[in-house]
Image (cartoon, grey):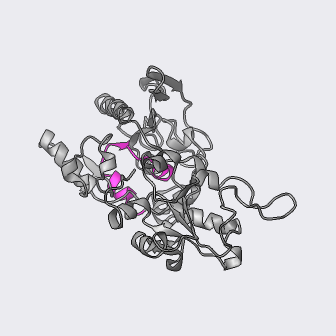
């Protein structure tokens, strides 16, 4: 069994990722999960990859295994996992959960070569990613722990069925798998709304798309082009920022401690913009911060019909023209995007007003300034 995860255990993970516990906060998730599984059953051979799945390592890692379970929470990684499973002939069991809902689908089953009749891949079901402003991870959008548990149990059940039925055996080029021996592809939708009983609904899916980027006969996707990124930039495809750490220059960023010492407690003529979702802002925030979610900030025109710059309603009319604007988010990624957006809106007054962010976001604020503040 292979475990691929480059993250570390955080306290906010524990309500839904039950293999971890408070004693292993700060350790890598791969190590924590290994300890849990090994204590449960020491007989299997466990292989740890304490890294994120990337273009460069995907083939090396996935080629070792028969069935792949996608437990990630971002579209770019989902497309990457699906593509490498198509190229290597691996069945993919994909599950996700957000807030009180979840979905489950078995992909590339049977795992036929590109251009052959086989199970649809992730791109067949979702040819285009959702708009970037609608994408939220579990950490950003929140998720009900039992919803994750329900999807995890269902995902495990499907993986077991694939293995015991032998559906993970790939078919060779020039052969066609007997599709009648396989269950029709379907998308399982789960919901457990706060105001009603839980529900499960199965949606029948079509087979492979004839124009699919990954699994069709016209696909130009090969392992070599996947690893060097010449065919697909997954982050750009999903509308993301290629490298959050390089979005702003060092001069446009301040540490949490620096903001607390030089700005928050001394200079009052500034604006601190918190671009997290209202649910997070309501749990914990820095005194004086104004909450405008990034999704709201990215909407709307920059100028009016008459060509004049639009002054946002949230911008205090008493704020001096040269007063700096600082942006904070959860971990320091969205704040950089927001700072760029503010400059595009012309709020930097032609470069005379400083606009930057707090490096590391609310996580850094908790670590450097206020250890008692909840981190969500």
Residue 74 pos. (x, y %): 47, 49
From the viewer's perspective, is 173 left or right of 241? left
Report the side of 120 relative to 32 (left or right): right
- Counting labels gives 0
Relative image position of residue 61 (x, y in whole percent): 33, 55
| Chain part drawn in magenta | 56-80
Q: Residue at x 34, y 58 (%)?
A: 60
Position in image of residue 361 (x %, y %): 44, 62
Q: Which quarter of the picture shows residue 312?
A: bottom right
Asked whether 39 or 372 is in front, the reply is 372
187 relative to 374, above or below: above
Identify which residue is drawn at 45% across, 23% down: 200
Foreground residue among 123 and 118: 123
Residue at the farthest top position: 197
- The residue lying at 22 percent from left, 49 percent from top is 22
Find residue 251 and report its horizontal and vertical position in percent: 52, 80
């Amino acid at each position: 069994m292979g475990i691929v995860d480059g993250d570390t255990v955080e306290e906010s993970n524990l309500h839904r990722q039950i293999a971890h516990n408070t004693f292993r906060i700060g350790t890598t998730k791969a190590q924590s999960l290994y300890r849990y599984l090994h204590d449960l059953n020491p007989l299997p051979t466990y292989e740890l990859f304490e890294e994120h799945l990337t273009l460069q390592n995907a083939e090396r890692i996935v080629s070792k295994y028969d069935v792949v379970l996608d437990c990630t929470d971002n579209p770019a990684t989902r497309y990457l996992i699906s593509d490498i499973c198509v190229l290597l002939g691996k069945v993919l069991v994909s599950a996700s959960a957000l807030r009180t809902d979840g979905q489950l689908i078995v992909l590339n089953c049977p795992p036929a070569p590109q251009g052959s009749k086989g199970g649809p891949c992730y791109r067949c079901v979702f040819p285009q990613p959702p708009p970037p402003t609608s994408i939220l991870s579990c950490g950003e959008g929140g998720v009900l722990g039992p919803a994750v548990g329900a999807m995890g149990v269902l995902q495990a059940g499907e993986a077991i069925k694939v293995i015991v039925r032998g559906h993970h055996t790939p078919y060779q080029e020039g052969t066609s798998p007997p599709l009648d021996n396989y269950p029709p592809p379907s998308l399982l939708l789960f919901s457990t709304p706060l105001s009603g009983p839980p529900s499960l609904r199965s949606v029948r899916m079509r087979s492979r798309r004839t124009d699919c980027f990954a699994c069709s006969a016209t696909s130009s996707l090969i392992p070599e082009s996947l690893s060097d990124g010449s065919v697909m930039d997954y982050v750009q495809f999903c509308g993301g920022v290629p490298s959050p750490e390089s979005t702003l220059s060092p001069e446009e960023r301040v540490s949490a401690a620096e903001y607390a010492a030089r700005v928050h407690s001394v200079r009052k003529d500034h604006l601190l913009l918190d671009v997290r979702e209202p649910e997070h802002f309501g749990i914990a925030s820095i005194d004086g911060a104004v909450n405008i979610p990034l999704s709201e900030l990215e909407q709307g025109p920059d100028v009016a019909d008459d060509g004049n710059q639009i002054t946002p309603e949230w911008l205090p009319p008493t704020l001096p023209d040269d007063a700096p604007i600082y942006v904070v988010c959860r971990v320091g990624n969205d704040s950089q995007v927001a700072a760029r957006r503010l400059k595009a809106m012309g709020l930097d007054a032609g470069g005379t007003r400083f606009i930057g962010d707090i490096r590391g976001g609310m996580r850094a604020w908790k670590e450097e300034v206020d250890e008692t503040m909840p981190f969500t």
